[in-house]
Amino acid sequence: MAELPVLDSTSEAPPRAAGALTRGRLLAGGLLALAALLMVNTLLGPVGSAVIDYPIPDDGALMSQLLALDVFAIAVVAPLTVCAAVLVLRRHPLGGMLALAPAVYAAYMAPQYVLGPQYLRYDGNSAAFFPLHLALFVLGWTTAVLAWQSMDPAAWVPPGSRRERIVGGMLIPLLTVATFARYIPALLDTAGSHPSAADYQEGPGYFWTIALLDLGVGLPAAIAAAVGVRRGAAWARKTALALSGWLALVGPAVGAMAVTACLRHLPDASVGQAAAMSVLGLLFTALALNLFATLRPPLPRPVNVTAP
């Protein structure tokens, strides 16, 4: 008789299995919708057809950042979101873990499109596309919540490994705190009567939006993850994974902004700064992949059954 490989899986009670299946379909649908909106936003923006005209200077630092964000969204974030959706639909154990990164990234980036532009200072029509950016924001945080709920730390490798404590409980939080330390001179500059940063002069809304999210959400999350992971808390493992996934995308996106500023020959841009930000972004990505590989649940093992 022929032997066919099947996957050994733990049986679930029907109501629980049905609920997990429904949440998985909702998560996958949200991810696919999020990927579509990311692509639509890029194609309608300055990188694509320029239908969306943001009220910012066309040749300034903010436009360079916006161009880099849109290119990164359609080249990296949207494909990653689709891959996560496919894994979730296949009920792959890595689907929820991968879904968390683009979802948190979208929820983090979407407010910049709304709160950053200077509507009374420059001409533009981006206010008419508020529903698009609102949908991006809502889909970002709702899919992040669904991804968070879909993850079961009990199915991951046992907590307390030395590698997890070093990467998730030390390196990623410390590097995050060190990166956010750049706000010290920036805040001192903005507190003065004549702020010198070019992007702040063009539109302070962008700066304050990111500062609020970084220092009000990212920094506390990094501190909480550092403490919780070292104590083996289940919620801290999920927090560290969310933080690392977010930084794995935000880091390279910021590096892309610095490179774009150099390519557009902006006065404040420098090759050294672009190189440093790119290396930092790749470091965040490498640490996130390391943590992902450390925590990932074991894949189902094939067992042999006899076919009739």
Image (cartoon, rainbow, N blue to C red):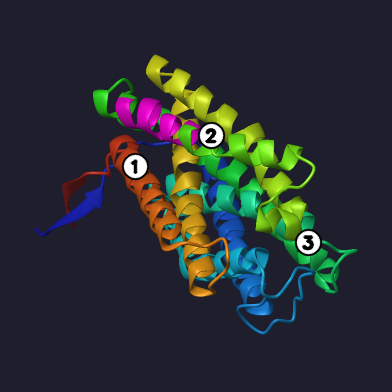
- Residue 172 counted in the magenta span: yes
Q: Is residue 77 left or right of residue 113?
A: left
Q: Quadrant of the N terminus?
A: bottom left
**Distance from label 3 to label 2 (Cα)?**
25 Å
SS class, disc 3: loop
Residue at 40% x, 52% y: name it. 276
- Residue 1 counted in the magenta span: no
- Of all residues shown, which one is farthest toward the right? 120
Give the mark nearest the N terminus, 3 or 1. 3
Query: What residue did someone put label 2 on?
Result: 181
Q: Is residue 39 left or right of residue 290?
A: right
Which region shows up in magenta?
Answer: 166-177
Q: Position of residue 58 (x, y in %)?
A: 70, 75
Query: What residue did someone put label 1 on?
Result: 287
Give the mark nearest the N terminus, 2 or 1. 2
Residue at 51% x, 40% y: name it. 150
